[in-house]
Amino acid sequence: MFPSHRRSLYPYTGIVFSASFLFLLTLSTSIFASADSTRNKNAIKPDFRIEREQSRIDLYDSELDGQVDLGDSIINAYANKTYFGLVDSIQQIIADRNISAGKIKNYNDQLYAQLLKVNSYSVYQIKRFDQSFRFMEGALHALNQNKLFPFLIKNVTQSLNLLAFVKEETGVDSFLIFASRSRPDLVFSNYNIYANKDYASRVIIGSAKMAPVTVKRYFNPGNPIFETLRKSDDTVIKAILDINEKFGRRSNAFTLLDDIVNGASTAEEADKTGADPRAYLRAMLRIRSKENPLAVHSLETELEIYALKFVRVLNDLHNEPDAKRFASIEDFTPEELYTLMVYSEEEIFTSTFNALFKRMMTKSANMSGHEFLESLGYNKFRTFIKMCASFGKLGEFLDSMSPLHKQMLMIKFASGLETYPDLSQAVQVADAFSSITDSLVLRILKATIRFEYLKLNAKNNQRGLIIYGLLSNLFVNHQPQGDNWFASISSQYALPPFDRIASEKLFGRDTISRWIIYFYDDEDGDASFATFLRSFADNKYTIADSGAYILLQSRTGLPVHIYANKPKHEYDGQEAIEKLFDQNKFEPNVMVHRGHSYYAYKTIEKIKESTQVFVLGSCGGYNSISSIIERSPDANIISSKQIGTMFVNNPMIRLLADHISSSHDLQWLTLWTQLEAKVKTTPLAYEGFLDYIPPHKNLGAIFIKTYNKMMEQVN
């Protein structure tokens, strides 16, 4: 077994070893070689590069004793299990597999590459490496069971980030083409990993058809992706290259690829259509209503961009009379109005949604809601139902159809959630539930979830059982006497309370709680930053100005240090803060995004594993929440149903800082009650506050976290 000899090797430290030590090392190596010859022919020698790296990690506490001391017994146990136990387990699985020498080498190369990333700073980022090693272990188990594809699609981003580990395996091409629906950027950027594989061309061609707008970034002579496509005889690829040759990369004709290939328009007509925002929106909507159109990823991305262009104007005019505010969309069709709503979920104001919904219903009065959704190919219908429920319009929409179609729609809404590669659709159902009050709708949903669970139980579909088992929690308090089925099931898939954070988790190893607040140079940035500073303008905090950023420090209680870049210094200010954190090996315990949702991804990409609280400050849509949890699985997320407001953000941040400085555990119910009391005296602030979702009520985040933990146990 690997543990029996792991500590026999010392890492290179720059020390000149004695002749006796080298003799012993040579002797031990020969013993292992001799022992190896007695094993079966499929067994492998321990990879001494991996052994050496484990010993290097072992020595971080200056003792080569088979464990690393990081200063806390719980952390030590986690670290030892990850860096030693889990890595040894992976090596043993590799040794036990009957595979080629090439695959063995690749597995060990990737395991070694991960261990090289562990240094005196990152050794404390145990969760990060635990996730990587668990992926490797899970992939090997999945290969043994011939279930690699379903394993990889469970977490597309993680699978793409660790693609090198499985690049030699059969079926990876199918996964990569599948992944291009959601992350074509990573499929293309990882091309160098699989470029020499026989499936490389199929992947690039298949992915280009899904995301021509993404692949066009590589259209430079000599680029390997571009050259691969130029060699293809595929008619769709030829059409993509023809657009590039005739109109260049700026043309919107790439998104209208389906029309061009299927003869609905020429490339010239598509390019002209793409230059007219309204005509372009209509063309995209028509194509997207089809089942599996070409360029589906590009269509989704562009529809969101163009919907937001219209909706942001409507939001900005919220103080204007309706005749002026909605003049730009008065001639929109009901299908176009629907598109504006569902593709602007993360930013649409309540008043904007209500006005668009009213116009949509009026203009579609000649057809039922059922016929209307059918004409749209049910595109994003779960998002629409969730939004209707959230804004109090679900009953009105459902009343536009017959009782039978109403029942069919709600069954469709809650059915087949396990067939989607991510949790986005299940989270839509969970989020909608909290806003549904109609007893008939609740009965339909309850019956559907029960039926789906029993069906999946008969198939032993573990992923589906977890999804519907977690959803069963929603009905525990809606049970008639004598019916305890939901209580029984939900007890097996309980949603744990995320109502508090232990105080010690909010501080670094030096007992300082460090925050980073990211401001952005948009139209609201300066005003937001100025009011933020005023909320700390008392004798309980000092304010130090460093030019591009400021540092707030608490004077009383435990130290809270808040770093915030100035809006006009979006780039150099954020860079200076991050450089300071890197140089001093600081990690942010709290992170705050202060800007529009279209900047949110920039902040989310900077999250660290140590981040315990993340204030999104804008709508917490599925993509944002899942990205946050992916980077920091334990993060508590505060979000809003629409764009955040400084009248809530500022008092919330100050209250949060005071709570953490007090050294008490952070209890969300207590903090939220106090925040409500602070903003209730100002009607505008209180109206915005009602759209905020605290961590203990963020059902989407709780659902994702619990699902991830349960899936880890299954695997």
Image: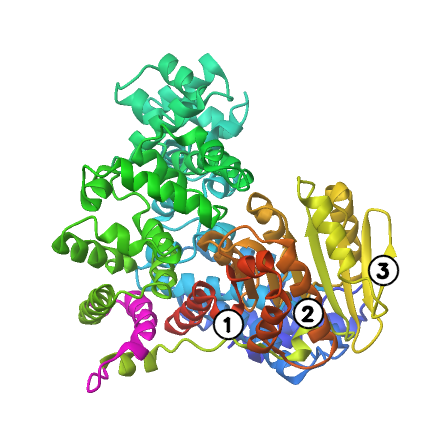
Tag 2 near tag 3, CB within 8 Å: no
Q: CA distance from mark 2 to mark 3?
A: 17 Å
| Amino acid type of the residue tagged 3 in the rendering | Ile
Magenta segment, prevailing SS (helix, strand or loop) = helix
Eye-nearest disc, 2 or 3: 2
Q: Is residue 242 in view from this perspective?
A: no
* Magenta-colored stretch includes residue 462: yes
The residue at the far bottom in this view is 482
Q: Position of residue 626 (x, y in %)?
A: 48, 57
Q: Is residue 503 above or below residue 656?
A: below
Q: Position of residue 209 (x, y in %)?
A: 36, 31
Eye-nearest disc, 1 or 2: 2
Give the left or right position of residue 15, taking residue 350 as reference: right
Q: Position of residue 547 (x, y in %)?
A: 86, 47
Give the left or right position of residue 668, taking residue 510 as reference: left
Toward which corner of the image does residue 261 lie, by quadrant? top left
| Amino acid type of the residue tagged 2 in the rendering | Leu
Q: Nearer the viewer, residue 103 or 300?
A: 300
- Disc 1 residue crowd, few under 14, some 14–19, many 20+, Cα 10 Å: many
Q: CA distance from mark 1 to mark 2?
A: 17 Å
Residue marked by disc 3: 543
| Amino acid type of the residue tagged 1 in the rendering | His
Q: Nearer the viewer, residue 198 or 364?
A: 364
Q: Is residue 275 above or below residue 422?
A: above
**N-term-proximal mark, 3 vs 1:** 3
Give the left or right position of residue 534, taking residue 108 as reference: right
Could you say which disc has been placed on residue 696 in the image? 1
Could you say which disc has been placed on residue 47 in the image? none
